[in-house]
Image (cartoon, helix red, strand yellow):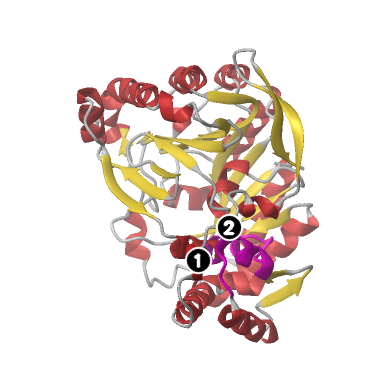
Amino acid sequence: MEKKVGIYVHIPFCKSKCAYCNFYSLSSFKGGDKLIPDYQTAVIKHIEEYAAQLDGYLIDTVYFGGGTPSYYGTSRLINILSALKNNGHVLLDSEITAEVNPGSISREELIKLRRAGFNRLSIGIQCADNTTLNTLGRTHTFEDAESTFNEARRAGFKNISVDIIFGLPSQDKDSWAQTIQRIAGLKAEHISCYSLKIEEGTELYTFKDSPFIPDDDTQADMYLYAVDMLARFGYRQYEISNFARRGFESKHNMKYWLGEEYIGFGSGAHSYVGQCRYSFTEDVEEYIEQVGLGRTIVEHDEQMSDFENAGEYLMLRLRTTHGISEDEYYNIYRLKMDFVLELLKKYEQSGWTYYKEGRWKFTPVGFLLSNMLIGELLDAQTRQRTQISKPWQTESAGEDAQMTLFDKRPVAAGLFGGRRLIGRNEFS
């Protein structure tokens, strides 16, 4: 039982829908709340049905995302976590995260979460300008965000992440600089910094191609400013959009970027287990009904080939500042990357990549162009595939080869319930 897995629990309920949100969720204004009790029952039953599969893993990360988990109710979140502890092997030092909206949770509720084992919060602040927050449909002010953050500290949370967005309507470089400064002043352990994406079907879509939206050059300047200033404030960039004080990188999100296994519960949740990707139906009512009847809720599934996993190695690990290694790539997939290397060297001349200590990485400017550049690298990988006869089908790639991004050391680990395991591998 040495294999580790992350657990994601989707909570698709919100008080109100944000103007930029394209995720499936139900707001209280549209009657979503009436489904919450039945959804809670379905998620717990779903977890119980997976007990046999969970038994083969150590659960080292749990992430409650949404939606707005804090709106869903702390007692319900705690009961779901208890179901995971009862049906799986949740490590005592597991990273357990809940997403929180400012003003949606009290200190008493935060204390309950902390006592139940939650040790990390992700607070969606988005920006420091109250007028812009109102435009986005956010139900809080920046002062509410400061209050929630401070209450979380008083409740004992020592690992807090905050989300911010650039490229917002009427946002200029000065207001973005103010957001960076005020967010840094909170002294969170982790900051996620995202570019606004205007998706069809959202309220904000009316702003698409509007002069009120900062143009591409301005958004690029905003991103590079954030990279520079956050570094000055002590936040190390470790992924395109994520910055952390040393040792506070999101362990759960790193599972996605390193191609590690994770299991999702709840409507629309995704999983990656045994080289198979699958997701459940997004429709909450259908999810509740099918789980209750013991029927399948899988909406999409795909068995990943070794070559597809090799492509994801390039795509996902180049999102991180750890980058990719020619030797590591060959050891895992028994594939050469000559065509990929040619492009990486070409990008280096343009200032988009650099080579350090055996690894290729994007520069901050390269991250800005990463969608295009990674697409070209994947095309190069496919071209090289046609030159040779399926060497990725050899059996010599070790099962643990993909773990070589980090040195590991054996430590003792405890489980909820008082059990103790010896010889667990932990990242140093």
Residue at point 64%, 48% (across, down): 191
Decide: is 75 above or below 234.
Answer: above
Which is nearer the eye, 296 or 402?
402
Callouts 2 and 1 close, C-beta under 8 Å: yes
Decide: is 245 above or below 351.
Answer: above
Circle 1: residue type: Trp
**Residue named by callout 2:** 397
Q: Is residue 397 left or right of residue 135?
A: right
Q: CA distance from mark 2 to mark 1?
A: 9 Å
Residue at point 62%, 16% (across, down): 115
Decide: is 69 above or below 371.
Answer: above
Which is nearer the eye, 335 or 224?
335
| Numbered tag placed on residue 179 in the rendering | none
Q: Secondary structure at mark 1?
A: helix
Q: Pick the quarter of the image with the C terminus.
A: top right
Answer whether residue 332 is magenta in the image.
yes
Q: Residues within 10 Å of mark 2 (few under 14, many from 20)?
A: some
**Residue named by callout 1:** 392
Answer whether residue 161 is magenta in the image.
no
Q: Is residue 308 left or right of residue 163?
A: left
